[in-house]
Image: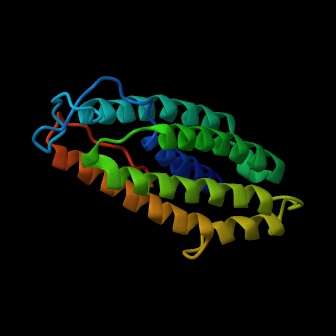
Amino acid sequence: MKSRLLWIILGAMLVLMLGVAFPSCGDDDDEDGNGAPTGDGEPDAEAYYQDVDRIQNSLTEQLDAIGEQSEEAFGDPDKARNSLSAAKSAGESALEDLSALEAPSVAATAHANLVTASEEMVAAVEGMIADLQGVEEGPEFDDFINGVLQTDSAYTLAAETMRDACAGMQDAYDNSRLQEIVFQCPI
């Protein structure tokens, strides 16, 4: 159960990375509503989605590394806090990049929803770190883990919001009729 929580949390943080991209370059316009460049200053939707995909893949590797280094983290509250802090740091960085990104109009709503979901996920992980303060190994730690996994926990609610935001991003992409990218929403 404890190692399952690690992968759930790291998976949630991975979803935060879904929206991370560097600002798109170029002077493009969405001439026909599908993200094709036309030159009037509209961000290039294809470049936006490709950046999202590329950055997501890179950050997946980072979170995998955190996971590999944290195999025993959820047997010990201090190690769990350290692993969660590393994941939170990655999530905050992703949120910063996501917030700075100028989304094309075809992805504006999905982008805004992803920013909101990312903020909620970072806050939920931050809450878990705070809740671990002073928690000892044993029944108290087990209670903490069980609480995180409850359907009404801040983490579970944030994960659901994140799943919805990911689905919205995939829908926005699918509606743009660009080359195929499938965004990975591991939650």
In the picture, measured across the screen, residue 101 lies left or right of residue 6, that is: left
Which residue is pictured at 28% across the width and 50% down the height? 170
In this picture, residue 119 sits left or right of residue 44: right
Rendering quarter of residue 162: bottom left
Q: Residue at x 53, y 69 (%)?
A: 157
Q: Position of residue 8 (x, y in %)?
A: 55, 54
Residue furthest out toward the left: 32
Q: How many discs appear?
A: 0
Location of residue 134 by image quarter:
bottom right
Residue closer to the observer: 22 or 140: 22
In the image, farthest residue toward the top:
26
User: Which residue is most to the front?
Assistant: 40
Q: Is residue 85 visible?
A: yes
Specify the quadrant of the image occupied by residue 41.
top left
Q: Position of residue 149 (x, y in %)?
A: 60, 68
Left or right side of 78 for 156:
left
Task: Name the foreground residue: 72 vs 33.
Answer: 33
* Image quadrant in which the C terminus is located: bottom left
Q: Is residue 49 above or below residue 10?
A: above
Tell me the quarter of the image containing the N terminus: bottom right
Which residue lies at the image location 51% right of the left edge and 33% below the top edge? 59
Residue 5, image x, y percentages = 61, 56
| Colour theme | rainbow
Residue 1 appears in the figure? no
90 left or right, relative to 79 = left
